[in-house]
Amino acid sequence: MSILSVSSLVLGEPNPSNKLAIIHILGLLSTCLRHWTSANRTMTQWMALRLLSNPLHSHLVPTRSPPHSVCLSSGCLGNVVVVLQQVFALIQKVLSKWLNDSQVVEAVCAIFEKSVKTLLHDFAPMVSQLSGMLGQMYSTIPQASALDLTRQMVHIFAITLSIFQQGPRDHPDIVDSFMQLQAQALKRKPDLFLSESLDVKAVFHCGVLSLKFPEAPTVKSTCFFFTELLPHCYDVPQWPDSWQRENCSSKRVLEGIGGGASRSLMDQFAEVLFALNKHCFALLNIWLKEALQPPGFPSSRVTTEQKDRFCQQILRERVNKRKVKEMVKEFTLLCRGLHGTEYAAEY
């Protein structure tokens, strides 16, 4: 049976026979991905690709290593991301007809339950897709298997915290995926962050560092994380007092607005300020005044009066997000010396 035959099976009318065959195929894929370790990656990748092309004949895959002519490292049969993309494509077809079936959804989650932990950073490019799929599954019919997988992803991708200690600038794609995962988890199931095993302070620190990345997509994902985190900040028991006293998050945002980041990110920075103002008003009131006090920050082009006016405008607006975005755009033009220019008129 080829992958096209599987697609035909999936798109057919749901019945008990099709269901058993689909769960069987998902189980075989789960077994392959679960054992995709560094020691046997070449063999398992070969098996997974064979399985994807002939899933019901997996017993024909030999147990010995593939022939030397099969060059996996050079990409002849693709790499881990290629296999995962094929798995996702198959699963998306499965869910198009079987999203309401708890047993099929459980089999889908089982595919990733072990592979996320085994593959570690190789899984990073797929985090966004898996987060979206989990949200789709849980919003259709809340099931324990989807929640368990989400919880596992939140905890396991805390491994990414070590990357921040070693030098996160070398891994913007992983950092982007990590921040997207945290934001999606907060959006879909915020009480996952109540777990004592999750170091919320460390995750927050990762977010602060990520705000200074030169890659716009990473910064956007990080701003999304903060806008989802701030409404729940006082619900998290680990929310440290020192965290609340620090001015690092708002200072990073102001640095970006002052010219340290692309102007395409101003809407995202405005959303972070709006969330801070709405959920942490007392802190933002202190933070803004402290951060804007030093001469030349966030730009030598703005005067003390202009900074004071910006601070007052932001603190007064706690309802209309659109107005906050307009304030931020005007202030960033002042900081960049572009206010009143023809270039600014197109902004």
Image (cartoon, helix red, strand yellow):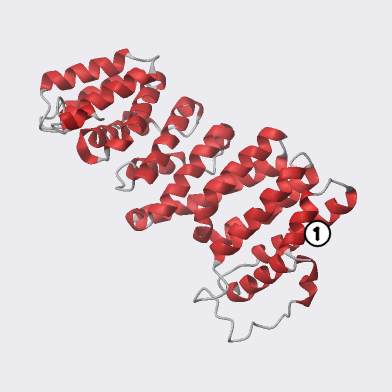
Residue at 80% x, 59% y is 24
Question: The C terminus lies in which quarter of the figure?
Answer: top left
- In the rendered image, residue 206, in percent from the top left (x then y), is placed at 38, 45
Q: Residue furthest right?
A: 16
Q: Does residue 122 lie above or below 195 as drawn?
A: below
Question: The N terminus lies in which quarter of the figure?
Answer: bottom right
Q: Of helix, strand and loop, which one carries label 1?
A: helix
Residue at 40% x, 24% y is 275
Q: Does residue 314 lie above or below 181 as drawn?
A: above
Question: Does 180 sit left or right of 41 as displayed?
Answer: left
Tell me, yes or no, if residue 204 can be seen here. Answer: no
Disc tally is 1
Residue at 29% x, 48% y is 214
Tell me, yes or no, if residue 52 can be seen here. Answer: yes
Question: Does 29 sit left or right of 271 as displayed?
Answer: right
Q: Nearer the viewer, residue 290 or 26?
A: 26
Q: Nearer the viewer, residue 183 or 96?
A: 96
Residue 226: image quadrant is: top left
- In the rendered image, residue 256, in percent from the top left (x then y), is placed at 26, 37
Type of amino acid at the residue the image marks with label 1 = His
Residue holding disc 1: 24
Residue 84: image quadrant is: bottom right
